[in-house]
Amino acid sequence: MNIKFLSLAVAAAFIVAGCGGGGGGSESNSPSDSGIVVPPVQPPVENKTTNSGSVEASFAPGAKPRFMMTGSRGQMAGIASPLTQASDGAVTVIGSNTLTGTPMAVQEISGNANFAQGRWNVGTAKTGSSTFTIVAGSHDAVHYSVYNDLEVFPAIGTLSCNSGKFTKPNYVGGTAYSTEYLGASTGNASVTFDGNGANVSLMITTTGAGASGTVNLSGTVKTGNSSYISGGLGGTGNGGMVAVGDAGNSAVNVIAIYTVVVANEHKTSYSGIATFTCK
């Protein structure tokens, strides 16, 4: 496995992912005796222009809150300051990255005092050096998770993780353009501390465009302010970036941005974010 280490304290990773062209729906012709033309059948799209999801509590930033992001324009990570979170849990300012405009919507909001997660679904997004408009029902999206440093690793031992919180992964690439913009993901994780770091066992399965695929993101986080990259990022192949955070009461969060290529003829790829809490 190709694993690289990244210090979140000093740099942000940003990788632009491109999309191919072509593709479309099929048309069903009307019966000859009615003269009625039935429009092409289109796949369902996400047209929500209001926020969805909820949090158990507002995120409580520590001394150095951090973030990870992924989506149609690339991946990045860094310090999450300044930070703006609405009363419903939606985060719209993360460092220099912002979501603005009217309408503006954040989907799959989740979290508690130890993390906040969601998907920018509608509005004007500024991430890194890019500014772009996200329209409901399009393939553009920005997924985020903000969390606190794990300053002291737990004693030697293994923690079991919950089933995780996921945003809906969005289409980021393939050999032919896909109109199925959003997929669905599930996964499992565990963490073992052995004195050399947090050894993360992590797998995520994504379904979309009539197929599914799985990415193995297992690796070792050496320190609480670092992460590791496994495989590729963006729309070119399976891979992701993994970090750990403080979940309070001796628990930890495992945060992962990922790309999964599903097993169809077009090698359609989806990108999203997930947070697991491990105790």
Image: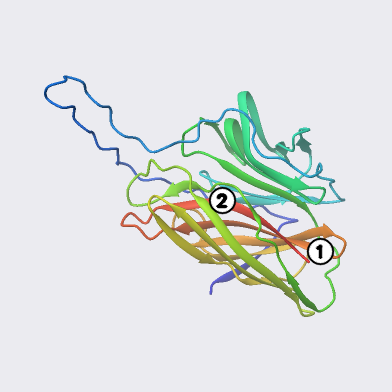
Q: Residue at x 70, y 38 (%)?
A: 96
**Image quarter (top left, top right, bottom left or bottom right) of the C terminus:** bottom right
How would you rate the neighbour count of disc 2 (Cα within 10 Å): few for under 14, some for 14-19, many for 20 or more? many
Q: Nearer the viewer, mark 2 or mark 1?
A: 1
Secondary element under disc 2, as helix, strand or loop, is strand
Q: Is residue 55 left or right of residue 133?
A: right
Given the image, on which type of amino acid does mark 1 rest? Answer: Ala
Give the percent coordinates (x, y) of residue 127: 61, 40
**Looking at the image, residue 213 lies above or below residue 84:** below
Give the percent coordinates (x, y) of residue 198: 73, 72
Q: Residue at x 76, y 52 (%)?
A: 147
- Closer to the chain start, of discs 2 and 1, is 1
Given the image, on which type of amino acid does mark 2 rest? Answer: Gly
Mark seen at residue 272: 2
Mark seen at residue 251: 1
Q: Which residue is situated farthest in the left direction here?
A: 32
Q: Residue at x 46, y 54 (%)?
A: 207
Q: Residue at x 81, y 44 (%)?
A: 59
How would you rate the neighbour count of disc 1 (Cα within 10 Å): few for under 14, some for 14-19, many for 20 or more? some
Can residue 13 be seen?
A: no
Residue 131 occupies quadrant: top right
Q: Is residue 111 left or right of residue 130?
A: right
